[in-house]
Each structure stands twice: as C-alpha cells, then as structure tokens.
Image (spheres, rainbow, N blue to C red):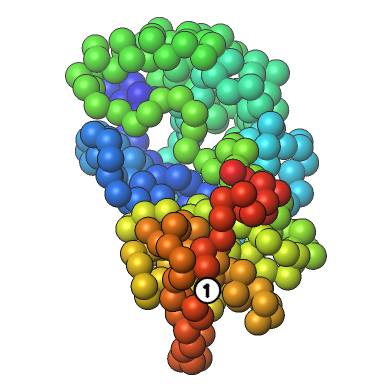
Amino acid sequence: MLAAKVIADQGIAVEGVNFFTGFCVEGHTHAIRENRSKRPKRNNALWVAEQLGIKLHIIDVIEEYKDIVLNPRHGYGAHLNPCLDCKVFMVKKAMELWLSDGFMSEHGFDFIITGEVIGQRPKSQRKATMPLIARESGADDRLLRPLCAKFLPETLPEREGWVDREALFGFHGRNRTPQIELARRLGIEDWAQPAGGCCFLTDDSYSDKLQDLWQAQGVRSYELDDIMLLKVGRHIRPAANFKLIIGRELGENRYLEGYRKQFPALKLESHKGPLCLIDGTPSAADLLLAARITGRYSQGREAEQIVVSVNWPDGRREELTTTPLPKAELAPEWLIGA
C-alpha cells in the first residue's frame, strides 16, 4: 500500500498485481468464520486498490505455485514457507507478464515495485537476499523497493530519472512505527495487519496438517480443495486410514456442508453439534469411533447416549446410537496441528 502510494504520488501510473496461491488467510478463513472482532471482513488486496484508486489484476497461479511449495530451491523457513523462492517466483511472474504480449506490455509498464523492507522478514527480506531476488527473477535493476531504496544500489528507474530517489525511504528492521507514521502523513488511516504475514505456510498448525496430508496420501502433492480444507475445522486422525474434519463454529459448519457430496458426513441428530467430514476409508468400527468423537464436541458430550447420522456422498443415510467419547479417551496424538 505504501510503496504504491509513494510511487503514484510522483506522478507515475501504478497498477497492482495480486497472485492467488490458495494459501492466503484473507478472503477465505476470515470470511468463513464468525466475526468476533472489530476487524472488517475483506480481501485486503482489493480494498487497498480501491483506497488508492488503482487497477488490480488478480492472477491465479495455483498450479504453477505447486513446485515452489514442494521443491523450494532455497529451502523452507521455520515451517513449510518457501519465502525466498516465493518472492523470486512472484517477481519473475510479473516480469513475464510485463515482457509478454499480455496486459503489462500493452500498458507500457517500465518497472516493478514491491513493499519489501530490509530486515522485516528473516527468510526473504535481508540485505543479502534483495539482490538475489532481483537477479533470479530476471527483473535485475527494474525491481525497485521504494521503502528501503536508500539502503540499496540505484535502480534503472532512479538512474533514468523516472523516479526521484530523494523522495524514497530507508526503512529497515521489524519495527513498523516508521511505516505507520508515513501512512498517516500520506493520509492513510486504515491498513491491513502489518505483522505476521497472511500465508498459512508460515503457520505451524497448518504446516502440521499439510505434512499429515502428504503422509496419508503417500505423495507430496495437493489439490486446491485439499489446502482449503486444511484451513477449516479440527483435524483429528484416530488411525492411518481416515481422519475427521470437525467444524468449530457455525461458519465452518456451513462451509463444510459444501463438501458433503465428496466425503461421508456425520451430523448429530439428538443434540446440537458440529458437522464432521470423514476423509479416508473408514470401517464400520471406525465410523462408530468417528461418531463418538463428533459427540465429544457437541452439546451431548455428557449425555448417556447420542444419535449420529452418517450421510454418504451417494445419498445413503444411516443412524448410529452410541455414547460420546470421554475427554480422557481422546488421544493427544490424534489431534493434528492442535
């Protein structure tokens, strides 16, 4: 937001590019779950473009991005986050669009800007990695970082006089106070959460769920529905052949309803409770255990008996009468990413 505003205020035409990888927190989890905070539910890329009055191009890179997640040349961060490879990929993709016969060349764009700040991220935003990103992406000195430009060598836009280097900045480190002060000077009073990122791959719980998915299917791969479902509900694996996805609140239950034609679904009939999807190949005994676990998270957790319906994707339906699983019998190792 700041990088775009700083460059636009120099009279330069700026347009935004947002790459959709499937792993972003915003626009999915925030939209599904009940809003218990004052934070608005919004896609911040769209919202920022609207606030700045610029055009935004949303590019689906889900399939191309798989190789970045599965085989990062520069490795992972603390979890399954391929931050350095991710940054190279996105700048390179922007360059390919700019150099191709696509929308960027037609609009006559001359260079790329990002909001990177030296020292702000431990994996990808270090002084040593800034030139690496520029070099490996192919952008070279057409990549300008307006917020920390004064700590970096001059780029082509600065040397050619397209951009006034003196109007750029020398921010560094994890402290966001200088950026917040700049935002207010520029008349910006609202912005997205500036710390923590918005990528699920930086989250230890999500990474555990993704590792479990790969182990269960015996191959390191994923589809869009896989990574979307990893964002939702409690994930419980009582055995190697199946796991449960149990909604934690109304919004998640409604979202999981959309998958009832793909997975067997358990629903409490005797008490209020969550919807539970079963991913795998459960036996009759597994179904009974799944029903008892689902009951554990329902309002019938203390009841002597509960009634749970099993709804199959082909339309078949059956009912199980059982007892909810006591908390002491819920093995901690069953909980994935807890």
Q: Please tell me which residue lies in front, 201 or 180.
A: 201
Task: Please report the residue visible at 52 percent of the width from the left and 73 percent of the height from the top.
Answer: 322
Task: Please report the residue visible at 52 percent of the width from the left and 41 percent of the height from the top.
Answer: 199
Asked which secondary structure carries label 1, the reply is strand
- Whole-percent x and y of residue 256? 43, 66
- Whole-percent x and y of residue 319? 47, 84
Check the image and report above or below for 184 versus 110: above
Check the image and report above or below for 115 versus 96: above
Q: Is residue 141 left or right of residue 135?
A: left
Q: Residues within 10 Å of mark 1 (few under 14, many from 20)?
A: some
Task: Please report the residue visible at 49 percent of the width from the left and 87 percent of the height from the top.
Answer: 318
Task: Please report the residue visible at 46 percent of the width from the left and 75 percent of the height from the top.
Answer: 308
Q: Please tell me which residue lies in front, 149 or 239.
A: 239
Check the image and report above or below for 297 versus 165: below
Residue 141 visible in image: yes
Q: Please tell me which residue lies in front, 44 or 263.
A: 263
- Whole-percent x and y of residue 306? 44, 71
Residue 95 visible in image: no
Q: Is residue 87 left or right of residue 166?
A: right
Q: Is residue 72 left or right of residue 183?
A: right
Task: Work out which quarter of the rendered image holds the N terminus and state it.
Answer: top left
Residue at the far front in the pictured view: 304
Check the image and report above or below for 73 versus 308: above
Three-letter code, disc 1: Thr
Give the residue at mark 1: 322
